[in-house]
Image (cartoon, rainbow, N blue to C red):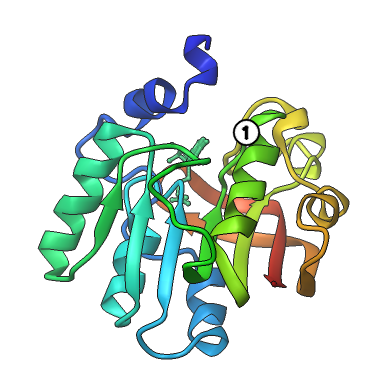
Amino acid sequence: MSKSNDPAIFWDEKFDRTDYRYGTEPNRFVADVLPGLVDDGARVLCVGDGEGRNGVWCAGQGFDTTSLEPSAVGIKKIEALAADRDVDISTIHDKMPSEQVDDEYFDALVLTYVHAPEPMRKEIHGASIKALKPGGVVVLEAFTPAQRRNGRTSGGPPDEALMFSAELLRHDFEGLDFEVLSEETVQLDEGDGHRGPADVVRMIARK
Ligand SMILES: C[S@@+](CC[C@H](N)C(=O)[O-])C[C@H]1O[C@@H](n2cnc3c(N)ncnc32)[C@H](O)[C@@H]1O
C-alpha cells in the first residue's frame, strides 16, 4: 500500500498538531439527528472517528460508544478528549473492515467525511452494513464532487473521484431504507479543516 493510500500514515501526519483539525464539537448533522433515531444507551460505532469529536460527543449523550480509527495519533487524541470530558469510550485502533467489529452489534454507525478510493470505500461501507443490527441506522455526511467543481476551499480531498454522490451512496448501501439522502450546500464551521460553504451529501439509512 502506498503511503497516500495507507490511512494510518496519511492521517497520523494530519492529526499531529496540538489543536483538533475538525474541532472538538460534533458534526452538526450527527448531533441534530442521532438522538432522535436511537434509544438511550444505544450502541454507536463511529467509523474513522479521527480525533474523536463525534465519538466523544456520543459518549457524552449516554450512548455506548466505540470509536474506530486507523491513525494512532487520532486514537491518542480521542482518548485525551474523552478524559478531558470525563466520558467513557471504547476505541479500536484499526481500519474498516476490522475483525474487532462484531457483526450485527451496533444500533447506529456514524461516518463523517470518511473518503476513500475504491475498493477501500466499498469495503468500509460493506463492513459498516455488516456491523449494523437489523433496524439499526447509518448516519453519514461527506463531500460531493460539486465541492471541487465549485472551487470550494472548505475541505475535502483534492481528487473529485474521492467524493461521494447520493447516487454512489444509494448503490453502496443498497438494501437499506433511505430516510434521508440529499445533496446540499451547507455552511461548515468544524475547526480549520472544514470551514465555509460546502457541497455535501447527507444520509440516514436503516437496515
Ligand atoms: C477527514 S477525516 C474525518 C474524521 C472524522 N470522521 C471527523 O469527521 O472528524 C477522515 C477519517 O477517515 C479515516 N479513515 C480512512 N480510511 C479508513 C478506513 N479504511 N477505515 C476507517 N477509517 C478510515 C481516517 O483515518 C480519518 O480519521
* Quadrant where the C terminus is found in the figure: bottom right
Q: Residues within 10 Å of mark 1 (few under 14, many from 20)?
A: some
Side of 92 where 168 appears, left or right: right
In the rendering, at what x and y percent does residue 69 appear? Answer: 38, 43
The amino acid on which the numbered mark 1 sits, given as a three-letter code, is Ala
Furthest-top residue in this view: 2
Q: Mark 1 = which residue?
A: 116
Furthest-right residue in this view: 167
SS for dot 1 = loop
Check mark 1 vs ligand 1: CB closer than 8 Å? yes or no: yes
In depth, the one of 34 and 148 nearer the eye is 34
Q: At 27% across and 52% down in the image, what residue appears?
A: 91
Splitting the image into 4 quarters, where does residue 45 fall?
A: bottom left
In the depicted structure, whether residue 90 falls above or below residue 44: above
Q: At 82% across and 36% down in the image, what residue appears?
A: 149
Q: At 36% across and 72% down in the image, what residue appears?
A: 58
Side of 139 where 60 appears, left or right: left
In the rendering, at what x and y percent does residue 86 appear? Answer: 11, 70
